[in-house]
Amino acid sequence: MTDEQMRTSLVRALSGAVRGEVEFDATARALMTMDASNYRRVPLGVVAPRDADDVAAALAVCRAHEVPVVPRGGGTSIAGQATGTGVVLDLTRHLRKIVELDAGARTAVVQPGVILDDLRRAAAPYGLTFGPDPSTHSRCTLGGMIGNNSCGSHSVAWGTTADNVEALTVARYGGDTLRLGRGRWDGAPAGLRELAGSNLALLRTGFPELPRRISGYALDALLPERGPDLARAFCGSEGTLGVVTEATVRLVEAPEARALAVLGYADESAAAEAAPGLLPCCPLTVEGMAADLVREPAGLPRGGAWLFVETGGATPAEARARAEQILRAADAVDAAVVTDPAGQRALWRIREDASGTATRMPDGSEAWPGWEDCAVPPARLGPYLREFRALLTAHGLRGTPYGHFGDGCIHVRIDFDLLSGDGVARFRRFSEELATLVVAHGGSLSGEHGDGQARAELLPRMYGDELVALFGRFKDLWDPDGGMNPGVLARPARLDENLRFDVLPKRPVDVTFGYPHDDGDFSAAVRRCVGVAKCRTAQAPGAGVMCPSFRATGEEAHSTRGRARLLHEMLAGEVITDGWRSKEVRDALDLCLSCKGCRSDCPVGVDMATYKAEFLHHHYRGRLRPAAHYVMGRLPGWLRLAAPFAPVLNALARIRPLAALAKRLAGIAAERTIPVLAGETFTRWAVKRGRRGTVLLSGDRAVTVWPDTFTNHLSPEVGRAAVRVLEAAGRTALYPGRGVCCGLTYVSTGQLDKARRVMRRTLDRMGPTLGGPLVVLEPSCAATLRTDLPELLPDDPRAAELAASVRTLAQYLEEYAPDWQPPRLDRPVTGQTHCHQHAVLGDAAERRLRERAGLAGELAGGCCGLAGNFGFERGHWGVSVACAEEQLLPSVRSAEPGTDILADGFSCRTQLAQLAGVRSRHLAELLAEGLNGTDTHPI
């Protein structure tokens, strides 16, 4: 049978046996080639089982066809164990049910695809939680946590996942099901009891005693004095023994109140040596990180490294008292106790994002996992860290340690060169020497993420050949055919095989954007995605903007990570073979809203909006584009032509048959209403006022107001309001020459040659206003000028000069008119911060200005779902509405009567008008409205 015949037979058999999705197309395979590690293995296909019966059926078919199986949860594994060459079981799509939660017994029965945060939310009303909490808690699954025996920051209080598992239901390769518990051999594979009984001495002496021993199989859990505990022995097996289809887990009592003691030390070794001394105070967690990981101090105490020590209590006072006890017990350089929940979240966010931020060194160079989570006895951590730093130096490497100091476990990303043969050889030499160092300190090669392919080859250094051989026999009893995740843990692949970088182009790809943070290399930009999957966080209000399309669809292809994986495979050319012409990449990017949320929310700064524009530019070069690209992508030009005929066109747009025809021809969704054109444009109004950019600047009180396309043609009232506010602040409003445009619509549709021509023309026409402060009222246009302009014209110094001059109205007033007092409005507001503002410009100045004006209330996060041309394009209506329903529309519906709706972006205002029937306004409009009868002159 040929490979193609075998594949056809396998697909047919799986499709007949499984009710869930069976996907063997290029997109499905490309999405599963990698996890969060350095490794890449190309699967045959993906199965998304609907229930335990589907899992068993898929395992039976795969065994009959001699095809290996890899169970996969959130795909955030660091060591390569969530990649494989056979069939990937995607357990996140359907198996996400919390079957039972027994608050009295403090247990929960869960399916393997349950997201940890979902379980914690379900348990919270009962005052309970699941103790282990890795930094990926918003997207990791319980099945994945069991597979890796995950730990998290609170393991000093509540242990590892294995410590919190009561029983497991497991399907083996071939489909038979076992029920694993504690204190009995029932459910054990044949021969397992005899294997343990004949090796008691080795099991009692071969395992180091330390809190974070995750490496290898937990065979010591089979000792009679420990149970035997079959469920615990299965935990940490990394998908090599079977597939968890249901788990009974223990819950712990969550403290009513928490406080955070933040302790500053001279360096990480000093912090590490201090950590064990704090454990008698019974903290919930003792986390450590060094200054070279912190890009901004963010209110941390003085020091070169810090311990985050969390305490709990029945009341805030009790939690604070315990935190102050920690301060007294600590010999720190500086310290602080944080009790405010928002302040604690901000500090924890620094720590949790470390798995992403550590992938870049302070100078921007890349750093990689591979030795991400070694653990030593906590008392040995200080000396170990000093020797670890010395080993890095000896190999000419750099790394940024951080992690679970209270448990002796550190995480580190190291700037390995994994692109060249010499670099990979050094990676191997360093790995071998570090393994020796860890063992010398009585440690474990893995203290949290498992061995996978990254470390399993070196397990004989930790356990010896005899015990590792026993691991192989243990694996064979569970999986005699060797079909479960081969190449991992038992009889592993070499640590320098299957590296995901091998398939990428060796030379930079010819691209249009400058990619200044990646030395102009598009491959390096795509490599930024390391798979930590923060973009897969769904249904978490206030969790930023990224990634609205994933939140709407729940599909991996519509996450930032999924799209980055497809681009990686496009560059590799193995699974996706038609390069820039790829329809798989095009289809995945089609639902990218270009919100730029990932630019700020992704810990490694993936900028999918830019990558999408780049791809569309190449994909459609020399080809017919979608109608929407010619209409909405070239909106500035069409609106300039339409302006003299605005009343007539508005009247025609109200005739339903004509409007329907126009929308069909323009590629606009039938559900959309065509926006009304302004009777008088902002620029025409400005010309009447007589202050063009050709007049001399009037000192430091002059400011240029940018006539963006949306303000100019669709909402000139915003521009007029902003001018009124600026003049009330004693400023002189100027306007650039006609025909200026940021190029936003051309960029978002990938018409980059046209975008650059428009941008160069704009720079030519800016005249004497270039370099002076530039107030841009539309956040998407401000973001384009700030980022896309200099990245598309990197060789034109005027582009960087213009980008540096961009300010929002609030930013300008705060910087150039700090003494101006806005009118007191004293009323509540709700609405949304524009996603481009969130991602590129920030909204701190807007928050402060609202506070000074007495506008109380928080604006929603997320994305409105319209996002320029996206929500208007045919085929995007459903996702556009779903994005709006995620945060924006609920916040508006729940607002009290009399609440003003704020939305600085034209897209946000349009979405609110069309979906909620409410009028929203730009902050400038509210301020201008409040100027009547107030003293608005500078102090």
Image (tube, rainbow, N blue to C red):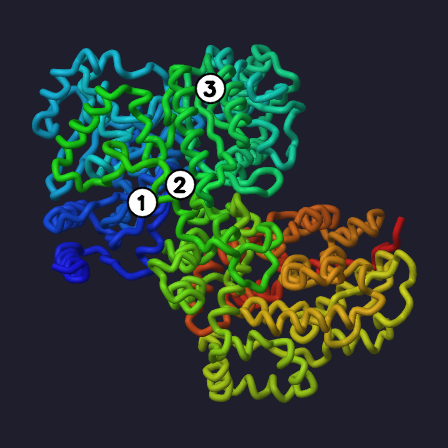
- State how far apart marks 3 and 1 are (Cα): 31 Å
- Residue type for callout 1: Thr
Residue 786: x and y in percent read: 68, 58
Question: Pointer 3: residues within 10 angstroms few (<14), some, or many (20+)?
Answer: many
Q: Nearer the viewer, residue 40 or 285?
A: 40
Q: Which of 615 and 135 is in front in this view?
A: 615
Residue placed under numbered mark 2 in the picture: 37
In this picture, residue 763 sits left or right of residue 5: right
Q: Nearer the viewer, residue 363 or 712?
A: 363
Q: Which of marks 3 and 2 is nearer the N terminus?
A: 2
Indicate whether 439 appears above or below 819.
above
- Closer to the eye: label 3 or 1: 1
Question: Pointer 1: residues within 10 angstroms few (<14), some, or many (20+)?
Answer: many
**Residue 158: which disc?**
none
Residue 620: x and y in percent read: 48, 73
Residue 437: x and y in percent read: 43, 20
Residue placed under numbered mark 3 in the picture: 406
Residue 260: x and y in percent read: 55, 24
**Residue 83: which disc?**
1
